Image (cartoon, rainbow, N blue to C red):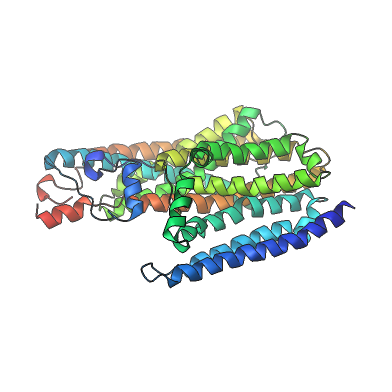
Amino acid sequence: MENTNIDYSSSHLAILLIIVFFLYIGAVITSNRKSHLRKWPFIRCVFWFFGILSVALSLLGPVASQAHMNFSIHMAGHILLGMLAPMLIVLAAPVTLLLRSLPVSGARRVAQLLRKWPIRLISHPVVATILNIGGLWLLYTTDLYMMMHHNLLLHIIIHVHVFLAGYVFTASIIYIEPTAHRYSFIYRSIVLLLALAGHGILSKYIYASPPDGVPRTQGETGAMIMYYGGDLIDIILIFILCQHWYRATRPRLIQQTQSFGV
Amino acid sequence: MIAEAPSVYNSRIPGILEMLYNTSILRGEIMTHVTNVAAVKRHTNTSYRQRNLWSGFLFGLGLVAFIDETVFHQLLHWHHFYDKSTTDIGLVSDGLFHAFSWFATIGGLFMLADLKRRSEWQIKRWWSGILLGAGIFQLYDGIIQHKIMRIHQIRYVDNVIIYDIVWNGLALILIFIGLYFLKQSRHSPFKKDETNGEY
């Protein structure tokens, strides 16, 4: 009975994801019509496509239908929904695109909204980390994981939270979009480091004591998928953060002294 | 892990400049007024010497952690993902060092790229950093993490003590060679001649 429920909602979800994908493409077309703006990079559309695809893969099809029974598959879905999809979507810079495609007055209103304190609070690196990693600890170390499989509403809330928390966290660490209140590279590096450690420690904790109702072997494989899958995404995040640091600290004095002839 | 550029040299006030840079309006137009060139040069010279050491240290640490993961965990299957006797503090230490090692590898290499674009790479000092980072991490892994925190053993055999001796002995050798290089690089003159005017 529960399965039919989820199947019913999954066709709605598929339509929703397709609409979201084409909204972005529509915004790209609108933005490209504005002659004073540079053309929107094609690679961002690619990121958006694969981001939406990752969400779809984790919530629809075989991964979603087997995630209830199999913890390893649930974990693969978690990596897709909570880490890969958010990263790809951050790289697609949807907020920047929104600001570019809206008329000036609308863009100004959105920019004002983004500067409001609730957004600032949630996108603070430490708060975003607690929402993201703390949420995972809560899910896998309490009865929440079991309850999730018996309550459709809880199921939806948790999956939405995993995705949104992943998105906010990624956006708080690497600045692709215009960000009102910025934190230094070293600050974000330390927060990212602690977040990765929290993720790794949780993986090994799950290996040792999987959530109730999860067979030992599945718990072990799932934990290893979480640990090494997490590593893969984290390497990309670290690389992007370091690359931004490298670009921002490029020597400027050399050019200056040369031009002054010192 | 990412060292801040000396403030006089780069005038990178974290946050503000980063913001200006990213708005791309002021990109390339930020100027610094330097009055005492010699003082700046002395300051940057010591700072670059330190950064060479740190870049090597971080990369060395990351490299050893990476070899540990690929060779001993994945290829040989000597190390175990989790050992029942692992203490809680061991789990935390392992998680922190695992995360830090990824950061160190990538960050260390970006620091190296930064030194190279500034023509400030001091090879001997950098290598001393590599050996020290590698040796110190291996010793920490071998003594604290394997033995005291009991994350996992080197190999699950009877005479694991032999493996422990080789492991930690190797770590000590790396540290000593690193210290020797460090001492040598300390005596070597500054890479950049002060009268050269080029920095």
Location of residue A237 in the rendering, given as x and y in whole percent from the top left corner:
51, 51
Q: Position of residue B185 (x, y in %)?
A: 27, 41
Taking the view exactly as shown, the residue that stands out farthest to the right is A1
Which residue appears at 43% of the width and 53% of the height? A108
Residue A42 higher or lower than B118, as above or below: below
Q: Residue at x 50, y 40 (%)?
A: A125
Image point (80%, 42%), residue name: A216
Tally the numbered discs.
0
In the image, B63 versus A17, the foreground residue is: A17
In-image side of A131 versus A43 (left or right): right
Q: Work out whether residue B167 can be spotted.
A: no
Residue B2 in the figure: left or right of residue A16: left
Picture coordinates of residue A68, whole percent (x, y):
81, 50
Asked whether A57 or A12 is in front, the reply is A12
Between residue A81 and residue B122, name the one nearer to us.
Answer: A81
Tell me if residue B162 comes above or below residue B102 in the rendering: above
Image position, residue A259 (x, y; %): 13, 57
Residue B121, visible in the rendered structure = yes
User: A110 left or right of A3?
Assistant: left
State which quadrant residue B181 falls in. top left
